């Protein structure tokens, strides 16, 4: 089930676990999700690990380090089950310069309890420094073995090329680009990002792989559930009655395929994502309840046919 992650020697499960939900409701970004008890987080991570998920994506901005802290604490409590788990986290660049990368890595290591940072990513392409300057600082961390591999997030095709070219000057390569990608957000297929990733051997990490839960079909079945969402999530995620109506044909087909595979629409949508482009695309669905983690695990236990993959593409 494991696959090679870009040009690295990491062998990762096609689905990792995104941990934005573990922000504890802290900070502007963390308020997107309701707080979880640490016991809930531990159950979610345990189910993921037992099901074959071997990596977790977090970030400095998720609750100001709260997601990293909670993740590390849960992994510690789940040893030895968690010993082979890999961690990807991110440096927040907005209103900062590249000089902040080496200055803040110690804090990332502290909240992660000294666990290896297998992938360190620049979270956004917006900062007071150039892409090349950021990559040079990242390269220093890799050379000092403070991190293993270097990735980016939300970078354009041109910015990916700049990042990879700079890292090559240090004998390194760009490992990944984390971008929004799902059946309803397919911009990377048209703006050069996916094509460039395949050309350079860069892994794509798809965040929001279920469009914040819209692809699960549960809101189509019961629109009243929209009232239970945080206002931030409801507004930012585009959860509107018009969105539900527009996507009903796709959800209907996901439900039909789910019946065939004894799965769920969520699992069909995730399976499409990790098989539509060979081994290029990985995905990081989140989980706020233990059964969400089990759905994630089960999504890796079958494979859609090429005809079904093409049909879902045509529907969107």
Image (cartoon, rainbow, N blue to C red):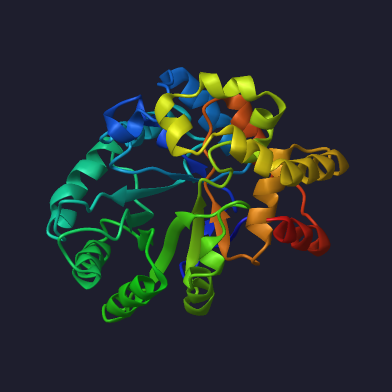
Image x and y of residue 179, in percent: 45, 56
Left or right: where does residue 188 sit relative to residue 268?
left
Residue 202 drawn above or below residue 292? below
Residue 223 makes an appearance in the image: yes
Q: Quadrant of residue 69?
A: top left
For the point 60% across and 32% down, the residue is 241
Image x and y of residue 184, in percent: 60, 51
For the point 53% across and 38% down, the residue is 212
Image x and y of residue 43, in percent: 53, 24
Image x and y of residue 13, in percent: 58, 52
- Hey, which residue is sitting farthest right in the picture? 260
For the point 39% across and 58% down, the residue is 154
Left or right: where does residue 88 sit relative to residue 103?
right
Residue 44 drawn above or below residue 265? above
For the point 32% across and 50% down, the residue is 90
- Report the quarter where the N terminus lies: bottom right
Left or right: where does residue 49 sit relative to residue 94?
right
Q: Quadrant of residue 33?
A: top left
Residue nearest the observer in this picture, 222 or 2 = 222
Residue 75 makes an appearance in the image: no
Left or right: where does residue 314 sit relative to residue 189?
right
Residue nearest the observer in this picture, 175 or 79 = 175
- Report the quarter where the C terminus lies: bottom right
Residue 213 drawn above or below residue 172? above
Q: Count every numbered label the image shows and give the total.
A: 0
Residue 157 drawn above or below residue 245? below
């Amino acid at each position: 089930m494991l696959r090679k992650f870009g040009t690295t020697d990491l062998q990762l499960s096609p689905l990792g676990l995104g941990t934005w939900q573990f922000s504890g409701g802290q900070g502007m970004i963390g308020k997107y999700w309701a707080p979880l008890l640490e016991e809930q987080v531990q159950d979610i991570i345990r189910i993921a690990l037992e099901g074959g998920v071997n990596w977790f994506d977090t970030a400095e901005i998720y609750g100001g380090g709260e997601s990293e802290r909670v993740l590390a604490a849960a992994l510690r409590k789940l040893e030895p089950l968690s010993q082979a788990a890999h961690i990807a986290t991110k440096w927040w660049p907005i209103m900062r310069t590249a000089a902040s990368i080496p200055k803040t890595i110690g804090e990332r290591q502290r909240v992660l309890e000294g666990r290896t940072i297998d992938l360190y990513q620049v979270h956004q392409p917006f900062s007071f420094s150039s892409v090349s300057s950021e990559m040079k600082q990242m390269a220093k961390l890799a050379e000092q073995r403070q991190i293993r591999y270097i990735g980016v997030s939300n970078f354009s095709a041109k910015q990916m090329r700049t990042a990879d070219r700079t890292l090559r000057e240090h004998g390194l390569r760009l490992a990944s680009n984390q971008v929004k990608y799902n059946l309803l957000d397919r911009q990377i297929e048209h703006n050069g990002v996916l094509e460039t990733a395949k050309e350079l051997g860069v892994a794509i990490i798809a965040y929001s792989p279920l469009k914040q839960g819209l692809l699960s079909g549960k809101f189509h079945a019961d629109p009243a559930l929209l009232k239970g969402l945080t206002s931030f999530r409801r507004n930012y995620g585009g959860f509107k009655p018009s969105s539900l109506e527009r996507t009903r044909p796709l959800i209907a087909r996901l439900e039909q395929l789910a019946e065939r595979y004894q799965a769920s629409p969520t699992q069909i949508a995730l399976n499409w994502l990790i098989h539509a482009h060979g081994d290029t695309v990985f995905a990081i669905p989140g989980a706020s309840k233990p059964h969400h983690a089990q759905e994630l695990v089960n999504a890796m236990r079958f494979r859609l046919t090429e005809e079904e993959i093409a049909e879902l593409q045509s529907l969107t």
